[in-house]
Amino acid sequence: MRKLQLVVIIGLMVAVLMPSLALAGGDKASALIVVADTRVITETDYYHGFMRYLADAYNTNIVVFAIWCTVLTALYGVALGFLMDFLMSKTGLDLKSRKIIEH
């Protein structure tokens, strides 16, 4: 039993330390720079203009991009919630009058 525990512990240590050995060139991952490619986004219509704005915000000010992501995610969640509530009420499932019984 002790040998099995030792093998499992050594296996877990190898699995945890293996990714650090696999770095290409030995450089740190913090040297990578990730940018959004804005060469193919035109500003001819509203949709592509907004996409260009978001790509530029990602490239220049990550805080503004994070705020936009948070706001848009919340708005999408609210919109999907209202849509599903509407669809469920049309199918006869009224969740507003549901009685919650807790023990």
Image (spheres, rainbow, N blue to C red):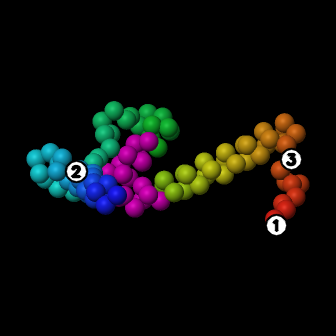
Question: Which residue, given by chain and number where applicable, does mark 1 sit on?
Answer: 103
Q: Earlier in the sequence, mark 3 or mark 1?
A: 3
Quadrant location of the N terminus in the rendered image: bottom left
Dot 1 falls on a residue whose secondary structure is loop
Quadrant location of the C terminus in the rendered image: bottom right
Can residue 16 be seen by looking at this rendering? no
- The residue under the point 86% across, 47% down is 94
- The image quarter containing residue 63 is bottom left
78 vs 63, left or right, is right
Q: Which residues are magenta?
A: 51-67
Tell me if residue 66 is in the magenta stretch. Answer: yes
Which amino acid, mark 2?
Met
Q: Earlier in the sequence, mark 2 or mark 1?
A: 2
Dot 3 falls on a residue whose secondary structure is loop
The alpha-carbon separation of the residues under discs 3 and 1 comes to 23 Å
Question: Which residue, given by chain and number where applicable, does mark 2 sit on?
Answer: 18
Question: Which residue, given by chain and number where applicable, does mark 3 sit on?
Answer: 94
61 vs 33, left or right, is right
**Residue toward you, 27 or 18:** 18
Counting from the top left corner in percent of width and height, residue 14 is at 23, 53
Which amino acid, mark 1?
His
